[in-house]
Image (tube, rainbow, N blue to C red):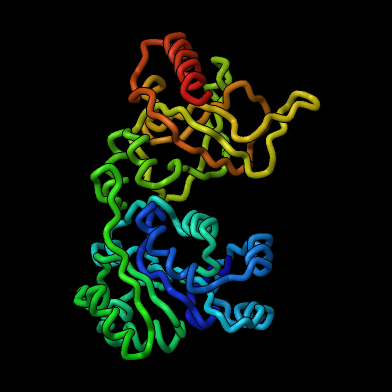
């Protein structure tokens, strides 16, 4: 996938799905579908692009032009998602906004759907002040050379969010661009939205969050050195360093599946553990040892090896219990064992 935050390095022409797409949930997937269909990607080209994924964040015009010159010129539009970074709410409020899918995760999830390009428009005062007409003319027509557009029914754009999805459709039509407006998506009688997914995660309702997402909610981070307390009680944990903007679910203990980015060979000679690996994850401040800052730690069940520096992707499958303080490390050890036993039954 080609990822850029500069309109000078965009691959054109484009078929554009437009929105924030935080979470890339089942509703977002329906908005993306029309641009994938319009691109009519031939089997050979699709296979080639899947075999060479790009996750590049650059404003370098020279590098972008090199990619452009290497691209196959088929005349058909690149399936493209146009999003905003930072999130518009963060820009207007000045407050950091936790994201279900920070930029790199968003790129991966969109790439899995078949999107070939992610354009992260820098959301600044200049962009915020564009009228709906100017946004369509300057961004979608002149810079992106859009041939088709897809948006959700509740999409708003332009200065003070004055533009609606139907306004976009009407303005784009004057340039001969077809716009698909995708209706609100419903799951089990509930609207699918990033806000509802955040609420479910905050409540520890993982099954509901995963149902709305259409996949398991994941945390991806690098293993860093912690206090190594787990080693002293027989449960060595991997301490994950996550992107600062990653949305964390309810504090507590979870049954999880873990994928190791660079392989799953354990410390036992010749022993290779298949991925994913079942595990137990704790999110919280570790009150038993008087912790103050929140940490994310995962114990890989029946696995041993050196994980420092490795990238782990942890899929949340079930909330097991809230965070609690134990009277002793022995009580904590007994509870972790019980958590592992329960996780085994959940994940088998």
Residue 267 in the image: state x and y as whole percent.
73, 27
Examine the rendering and report whether any part of residue 325 can be seen.
yes
Exactly how many numbered labels are in the figure?
A: 0
Q: Residue 295, position in %: x, y?
A: 44, 35
Which of the 4 image quarters holds residue 153?
A: bottom left
Q: What quarter of the picture does the N terminus occupy?
A: bottom right
- 95 left or right of 13? left
Between 14 and 7, the one nearer to me in the picture = 14
Determine the image quadrant of residue 130: bottom left
Residue 272 percent location from the top left of the image: 73, 30
Task: Report the residue at 43% width, 89% height from top.
Answer: 142
- Residue depicted at 57% across the width and 41% down the height: 312
Q: Position of residue 232 (x, y in %)?
A: 56, 17
Q: Is residue 142 left or right of residue 2?
A: left
**At 29% from the left edge and 38% from the top edge, which residue is drawn?**
202
Asked if 64 appears above or below 270 in the picture, the reply is below
**Residue 291 makes an appearance in the image:** no
Answer with the quarter of the image where residue 248 lies: top left
Q: In this rendered view, identify the residue nearer to me: 295 or 69.
A: 69
Residue drawn 45% across the image and 44% down it: 215
* The residue positioned farthest toward the right in the image shown: 270
């Amino acid at each position: 996938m080609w990822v850029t935050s500069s309109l000078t390095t965009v691959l054109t022409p484009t078929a554009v799905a437009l929105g924030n797409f935080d979470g890339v949930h089942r509703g977002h997937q329906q908005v993306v579908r029309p641009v994938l269909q319009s691109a009519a990607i031939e089997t050979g080209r699709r296979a080639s692009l899947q075999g060479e994924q790009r996750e590049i964040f650059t404003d370098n015009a020279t590098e972008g032009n090199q990619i452009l010159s290497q691209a196959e010129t088929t005349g058909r539009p690149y399936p493209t998602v146009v999003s905003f970074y930072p999130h518009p709410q963060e820009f207007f409020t000045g407050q950091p906004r936790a994201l279900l899918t920070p930029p790199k995760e968003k790129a991966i999830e969109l790439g899995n759907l078949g999107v070939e390009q992610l354009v992260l428009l820098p959301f600044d005062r200049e962009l915020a002040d564009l009228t709906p007409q100017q946004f369509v003319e300057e961004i979608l027509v002149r810079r992106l050379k859009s041939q088709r557009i897809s948006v959700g029914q509740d999409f708003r754009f332009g200065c003070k969010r004055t533009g609606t999805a139907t306004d976009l459709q009407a303005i784009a039509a004057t340039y001969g661009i077809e716009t698909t407006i995708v209706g609100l998506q419903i799951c089990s009688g509930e609207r699918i939205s990033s806000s509802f997914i955040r609420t479910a995660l905050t409540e520890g309702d993982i099954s509901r969050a995963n149902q709305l997402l259409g996949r398991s909610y994941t945390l991806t981070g690098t293993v860093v050195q912690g206090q190594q307390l787990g080693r002293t009680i027989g449960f060595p944990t991997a301490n994950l360093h996550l992107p600062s903007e990653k949305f964390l679910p309810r504090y507590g203990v979870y049954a999880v599946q873990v994928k190791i980015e660079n392989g799953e060979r354990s410390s036992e000679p010749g022993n290779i553990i298949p991925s994913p690996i079942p595990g137990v994850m704790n999110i919280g401040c570790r009150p038993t040892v008087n912790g103050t800052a929140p940490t994310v730690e995962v114990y890989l069940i029946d696995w041993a090896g050196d994980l420092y520096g490795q990238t782990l992707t942890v899929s949340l499958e079930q909330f097991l219990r809230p965070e609690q303080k134990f009277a002793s490390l022995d009580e904590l050890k007994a509870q972790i064992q019980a958590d592992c036993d329960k996780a085994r039954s959940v994940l088998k």
